[in-house]
Image: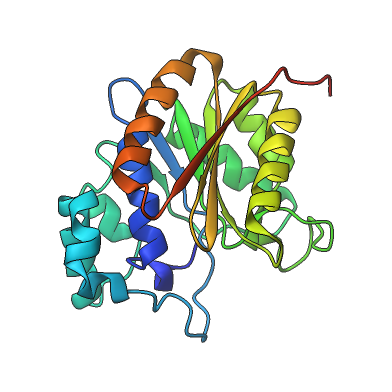
């Protein structure tokens, strides 16, 4: 995640999803921003939805207004989310994520200390889950979350939600393959995909959370269905 993305259309959907699925009582949330340094590109300028309230605001009016206020105030930073309680009572890991090595291991160790009572963790890397072409020690590794890091979170008893940017591949094929792989690697029986025109959110639920996630995902789909396609995959996990 880069602060320059804060408040764009993907952020609106992202926060809308987190607000729909999580809550302080039944599914308290930890957010691992996996922050990286802002770049000098035009990325993050997808804020035209804020000029179309008739099409977008009704999904989550309070969230829409707060993100609009941040963009207008030029406060495009994840600290706005914490300061304005966009995700009530969530825990946040806001430090810049380092490349692979002892510092990165310590970074994730800090995450578990920050969120000892959370039931679900959201990982928000720049691009998504690791790819073979980018090694663990590469300077580009902070743009990705590793399978081992997702597996550690799941093995700690947390449901896992992760941001994934679509590569140059048919979206439906990529989504189906990635949903299946997430289930297999985490040994999770129930995985949801929330697909937009450019990004995919993946949620591997702990068995004790499945009914709650299923019900809230259905409600989310009813409200956000014009912009987000929700897919559930339930299967017996394979042996790792």
Residue 226 x/y as whole percent: 36, 53
The residue furthest top is 208
Is residue 28 among what the camera can see? no
Horizontal placement of 64 versus 188: left or right?
Answer: left
Horizontal placement of 164 versus 84: left or right?
Answer: right
Q: Residue at x 50, y 60 (%)?
A: 35
Against 26, residue 172 (above or below) is: below
Residue 213 location, quadrant: top left
Residue 81 x/y as whole percent: 28, 54
Number of numbered labels in the structure image:
0
Horizontal placement of 157 versus 7: left or right?
Answer: right
> 171 or 92: which is nearer to us?
171
Is residue 7 among what the camera can see? yes
> 108 or 174: which is nearer to us?
174
Q: Residue at x 53, y 58 (%)?
A: 199
Residue 53 x/y as whole percent: 18, 66
Against 224, residue 142 (above or below) is: below
Q: Residue at x 43, y 54 (%)?
A: 94
> 129 or 104: which is nearer to us?
129
Residue 96 x/y as whole percent: 52, 60
Q: Residue at x 60, y 31 (%)?
A: 153
Horizontal placement of 53 versus 176: left or right?
Answer: left
Q: Quadrant of the C terminus?
A: top right
> 99 or 131: which is nearer to us?
131
């Amino acid at each position: 995640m880069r602060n320059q993305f804060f408040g764009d259309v993907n952020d609106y959907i992202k926060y809308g999803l987190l607000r729909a699925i999580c809550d302080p009582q039944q599914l308290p949330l930890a957010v691992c921003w996996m922050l990286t340094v802002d770049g000098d590109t035009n990325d993050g300028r997808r804020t035209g939805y804020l000029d179309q309230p008739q099409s977008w605001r009704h999904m989550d009016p309070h969230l829409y207004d707060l993100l609009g206020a941040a963009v207008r105030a030029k406060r495009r930073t994840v600290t706005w989310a914490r300061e304005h309680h966009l995700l009530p009572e969530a825990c946040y890991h806001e430090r810049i994520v380092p490349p692979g090595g002892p510092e990165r291991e310590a970074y994730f160790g800090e995450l578990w200390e920050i969120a000892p009572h959370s039931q679900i963790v959201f990982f928000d890397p720049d691009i998504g889950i690791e790819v073979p072409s980018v090694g663990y020690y590469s300077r580009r590794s902070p743009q990705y979350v590793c399978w081992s890091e997702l597996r550690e979170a799941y093995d700690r008893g947390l449901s896992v939600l992760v941001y994934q940017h679509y590569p140059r591949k048919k979206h439906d094929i990529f989504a189906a393959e990635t949903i299946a792989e997430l289930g297999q690697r985490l040994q999770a029986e129930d995985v949801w995909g929330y697909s937009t025109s450019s990004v995919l959110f993946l949620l591997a639920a702990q068995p004790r959370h499945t009914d709650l996630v299923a019900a809230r995902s259905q409600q989310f789909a009813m409200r956000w269905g014009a912009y987000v396609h929700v897919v559930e995959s339930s299967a017996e996990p394979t042996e790792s």
